[in-house]
Amino acid sequence: MKLLRVGPAGAERPALLDQDGTLRDLSALVGDVDGSLLADESALARIRAALGAGVLPVLDATGLRIGPPVGRIGKVVCIGLNYHGHAAETGAATPAEPVVFLKAPDTVVGPDDTVLVPRRSTKTDWEVELAIVIGRTARYLETDEQALAHVAGYAVAHDVSEREFQIERGGTWDKGKNCETFNPLGPWLVTADEVPDPQALGLRLWVNGELKQDGNTSDQIFPVAEVVRYVSQFMTLYPGDIINTGTPAGVAMGQPEPKPYLRAGDVVELEIDGLGRQRQQLKDA
């Protein structure tokens, strides 16, 4: 299933995109697409049954904003330097273990919402990423099979980053990762049963129509199952939590001088095979 949330920011309603591309209203069946829904197999079964029976009302998509596909996110866990190509382009050594940092849930916006270039920013960068959406409480998982069984689905994430704040201003990466609007998510949460191999997904990103990133999750240093298993050793993952799994080569930081960092007026578009497409225009904060 392709689950999503539509409507004004803060007042989104649950919806579903059917196999014909028709938007369907879920608000009579469930209150929201969030952790409580993703952990409730009976509720998900009711949605599947209603979809199969053809009884879900049609929503007019004209002018309708698409919000983040998951509401009430508890935490956004991120994996840095998780593609061989990206590590190489930035001159970083291949990590021996996953590099883990956090983004605040309030950085998450809809897939086509405006992205704000922070005040005094000189190095705002792009990163297309595969996002994992957790569906069952996960702690101290032992095997890849257990890890994948705790995944509700996948989505497109844009891990926007300010490299000067991240690298040159002291401390951890958090200052360059948690600026307002720095995590567009969606358009859909695609349930795990529709993504048979998360290590075979193409990821692409364009800036002002120019292709900048063209990678594949097969290049991940730590694959999806290992990431979920590893993170569960250090923190409890709850239904509705998000894990951004890193970006392929092609970011601005990895390009020759003058590096083409983002500015107000730029348009970024990104997509992952089967998971949908995003488009954001940048404005000054």
Image: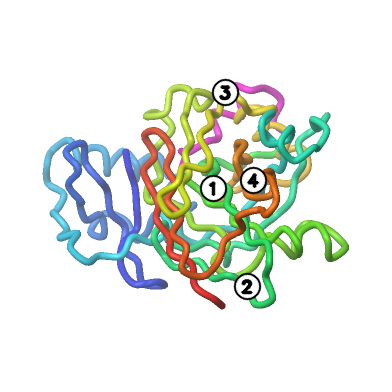
Residue at x-position 66% and y-position 53%: 259
Q: Earlier in the sequence, mark 4 or mark 3?
A: 3
Q: Against 214, is 58 above or below?
A: below
**Residue 187 locus on image (x, y percent):** 38, 51
- The residue at which mark 4 appears reads as 237
The reply to whether the C-beta atoms of the residues labelled 4 and 1 are less than 8 Å apart is no
Question: In 3D space, how far apart are the residues under numbered discs 3 and 2 (Cα atoms)?
Answer: 33 Å
Helix or strand or loop: what does disc 1 sit on?
loop
- Image quarter where the C terminus lies is bottom right
Residue at x-position 46% and y-position 60%: 71
* Amino acid type indicated by mark 2: Pro
* Amino acid type indicated by mark 4: Leu
The reply to whether the C-beta atoms of the residues labelled 1 and 3 are less than 8 Å apart is no
Q: Against 118, is 38 above or below?
A: above
Look at the image and say whether residue 144 sits in the magenta stretch: yes
Helix or strand or loop: what does disc 3 sit on?
helix
Name the image quarter holding residue 75. bottom right
- The residue at which mark 3 appears reads as 218
Front of the two marks 2 and 1: 2
Front residue of 67/28: it is 67
* Amino acid type indicated by mark 3: Ser
- The residue at which mark 2 appears reads as 118
Question: In 3D space, how far apart are the residues under numbered discs 2 and 1 (Cα atoms)?
Answer: 31 Å
Front residue of 95/84: it is 84
Q: Earlier in the sequence, mark 3 or mark 2?
A: 2
Residue at x-position 66% and y-position 47%: 78
Question: In 3D space, how far apart are the residues under numbered discs 4 and 3 (Cα atoms)?
Answer: 24 Å
Helix or strand or loop: what does disc 4 sit on?
loop
Is residue 223 in view? yes
Helix or strand or loop: what does disc 2 sit on?
loop
